Amino acid sequence: MPLCRTGAKINNTDAIFNLLIFYCFFLRIILIQFKIIQFRFLEPILNGFQYF
């Protein structure tokens, strides 16, 4: 990623690129939280089914 960027068009693409990075990061956090919730709630249920 070059540091010397000039021009409104390039700055606009930079903003879009940063937005995409932010969305990917946000989705990653949501997925991690979902995995934690899934592990917390499904694991005791699956462990409970093993006793039957």
Image (spheres, helix red, strand yellow):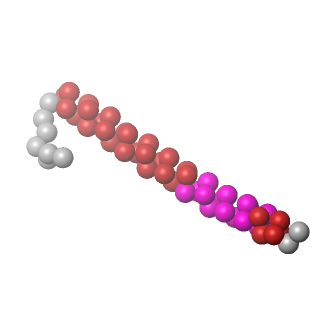
Looking at the image, residue 29 sits to the left or right of residue 20; the answer is right
Q: Position of residue 25 (x, y in %)?
A: 43, 50
- Position of residue 26 relative to residue 5, above or below, is below
Q: Residue 40: name its quadrant.
A: bottom right
**Location of residue 19 by image quarter:** top left
Judge from the rendering whether residue 42 lies leftward or rightward of residue 4; answer left or right: right
| On screen, residue 49 above or below 3 | below
Residue in front for this viewpoint, 48 or 3: 48
Does residue 24 appear to the left or right of 32 in the view shown?
left
Kindly give the residue lying farthest to the right in the view shown: 52
Q: Residue at x 88, y 69 (%)?
A: 52
For this orientation, the residue located farthest to the bottom is 51
Quarter of the image for residue 14 reads top left
Q: Which residue is depicted at the point 18% across and 46% down?
A: 1
Q: Nearer the viewer, residue 43 or 14?
A: 43
Residue, x 44% and y 42% (percent of image)?
23
Q: Position of residue 51 (x, y in %)?
A: 85, 72
Q: How many marks are shown on the rendered structure?
A: 0
Magenta region includes residue 42: yes
Q: Position of residue 2 (x, y in %)?
A: 14, 45
The magenta-colored residue range is 32-45
User: Which residue does the image show at 60% across and 57% down from the upper left?
Assistant: 35
- Residue 33 colored magenta? yes
Q: Is residue 45 left or right of residue 11?
A: right
Magenta-drawn stretch, dominant element (helix, strand or loop): helix
